[in-house]
Image (cartoon, rainbow, N blue to C red):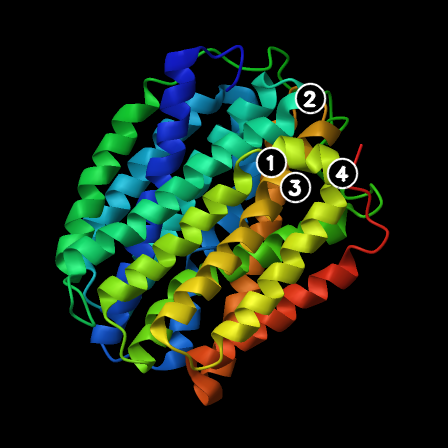
Amino acid sequence: MIGELGRRSSTALLLHSALIQAITFLVRPAATYRALELDVPAFALGVLAASYAVFPLLLALPIGNLVDRLGERRLMAAGSAVVLSCSVFLLLWGSSVAALIAGTALLGAGQLACVVGQQAVVANNAASSRLDSAFGYLTFAASLGQALGPLAISLVGGQSVRPDTHSIFLLAAGMGLVLFGTTFLVSSRVSGGKRATSSGGAPRGSAFSLLRVPGVARALATSATVLAVVDLTVVYLPALGAERGLTAATVGLMLTVRAVFSMVSRLGLGRVSRRLGRLKLLVLSLADSTVALAVAAIPMQEWLLFVVMAFLGLGLGIGQPLTMSWLSGQAPEGQRGRALALRLAGNRVGQVVLPSAIGVVAVGLGASGVFLASAVAVGATMLLLRGVRLDD
């Protein structure tokens, strides 16, 4: 996948990417089910969703600086340790809304460190002509993890509408231990060779300077909206299933279907983006996501909702790797961690603002209203892309 890393290190990187997403997509729906057990009001689920992004929002840019200075593996190891601690915390003490919010926030911080490290490995080792493909493989592995996490809920939860969350958190702790061990199979070599140095003030070509490039802020807003909608799907699909009497196993399989089709959308991504262009491909994916979210709000037969989740997965799966490769190509060597952290910081803004705002909709319209409001948000991002240059 990444020429300079070697087969073992590349495999470990992809496994690490899959594991961190599997744990995240296992723990976050489980936290929702635990909150439902506690009979929290609907708007509190929005607060729970937003809490995942609070620490990452504050830490994204500092972590980007750290990965450029210290190297990727150290950051990935620290993030893995935090994720493991989060799973143990929720297993032992996740019996109140406050504890669920704290544990979810801790999960977000650990996941951020892992993801920034993984993306920096790719950005610092892949040739510029192979960035779309390399990030496509990395996000393919991430989608695999996003599929396995909800699948584990189906296996543990069985046919009950509300699964045994204690068993889910126990499984997450075991996976966190494996995640931590996998970190040390990734090459410890400091990638990129030339680390950023500064003789005063922000370094030349820093992440902040990218904001002055025409269209960058709007493209980052698009990335943030797409990721926030993925989050909302994870949080509110269990609520939608509970409203419609779907079992936890069914909801878990629906989340798995969404993740699997996100994987499919990333196969051959480099070839497709070269043929259509990044911007056109991104607009097509947003249009597909908008329609799928709007349709999901309509009561329908169970099998039709599976189809809708498949189309939603196809649409949501494309935006993230395209914006990763684009920003990596814009950033100078030695500062790509900062650039990717800027993107993640923007994503976290979306993860705080959008779920909190849309969570208010749930008070009057329920989970169906959340999906409809999400469709409006994604559709609006297509207007933001007017004049943006995502292609080289």
Of the two numbered discs 4 and 3 in the rendering, the one whose residue sits closer to the viewer? 3
Q: Residue at x 48, y 80 (%)?
A: 298
Residue 221 drawn above or below residue 198: below
- CA gap between label 4 and label 1 equals 24 Å
Three-letter code, disc 4? Leu
Three-letter code, disc 1? Leu
Give the residue at mark 1. 269
Of the two numbered discs 1 and 2 in the rendering, the one whose residue sits closer to the viewer? 1
Q: Residue at x 25, y 43 (%)?
A: 85
Give the residue at mark 3. 323
Ranked by sequence position, the earlier of labels 3 and 1 is 1
Dot 1: what SS? helix
Give the residue at mark 4. 210
10 Å crowding of disc 2: few (<14), some (14-19), many (20+): some
Of the two numbered discs 2 and 4 in the rendering, the one whose residue sits closer to the viewer? 2
Q: Is residue 97 left or right of residue 143?
A: left
